[in-house]
Image: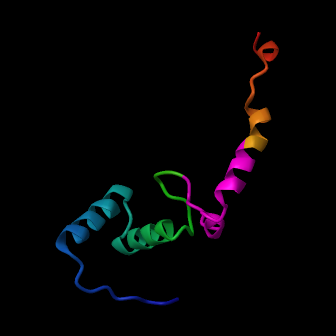
């Protein structure tokens, strides 16, 4: 395992990390590791689902016409059949 030394931790960050450790009843080391794992997406966060970035490279790659065609293709699926809701 790799050991990392952190320097120049701002007092407010140090205090917040200590509060977090106390609140979870864990050591400061375990708390920092947990937070690093959460923020890097290696484990789910306490505050919601883990974020996934495996499709980020696709964001913004469609042309306006491709996006419009996709929306047109979904229109039939977005219609509500009144008979099903009676």
Specify the quadrant that holds the C terminus: top right
Residue found farthest to the top: 86
Residue 50 relative to residue 33: left or right: right
Residue found farthest to the front: 65
Residue 61 located within the stretch drawn in magenta: yes
**Quadrant assignment, res 9:** bottom left
Residue 70 relative to residue 42: left or right: right
**Quadrant assignment, res 66:** bottom right
Residue 55: image x %, image y %?
A: 65, 65
Residue found farthest to the left: 11
Q: Nearer the viewer, residue 27 or 16?
A: 16
Residue 24 located within the stretch drawn in magenta: no
Going 66% across and 60% down the picture, which residue do you hit? Answer: 63
Q: How is the image coloured?
A: rainbow
Q: Nearer the viewer, residue 65 or 47?
A: 65
Going 67% across and 61% down the picture, which residue do you hit? Answer: 62
Residue 24 relative to residue 81: left or right: left
| Numbered marks: total | 0
Residue 70: image x %, image y %?
A: 73, 49
Going 37% across and 60% down the picture, which residue do you hit? Answer: 25
Residue 32: image x %, image y %?
A: 39, 72
Going 69% across and 48% down the picture, which residue do you hit? Answer: 68
Q: Which residues are magenta?
A: 49-71
**Quadrant assignment, res 50:** bottom right
Q: Nearer the viewer, residue 40 or 15?
A: 40
Residue 40: image x %, image y %?
A: 51, 71
């Amino acid at each position: 395992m790799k050991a990392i030394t952190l320097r120049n931790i701002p007092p407010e960050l140090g205090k917040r990390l200590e509060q977090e450790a106390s609140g979870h009843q864990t050591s400061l080391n375990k708390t920092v590791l947990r937070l690093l794992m959460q923020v890097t997406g290696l484990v789910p966060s306490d505050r919601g689902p883990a974020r996934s970035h495996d499709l980020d490279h696709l964001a913004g790659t469609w042309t306006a016409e491709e996006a419009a065609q996709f929306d047109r293709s979904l229109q039939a699926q977005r219609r509500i059949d009144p008979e099903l809701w009676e």
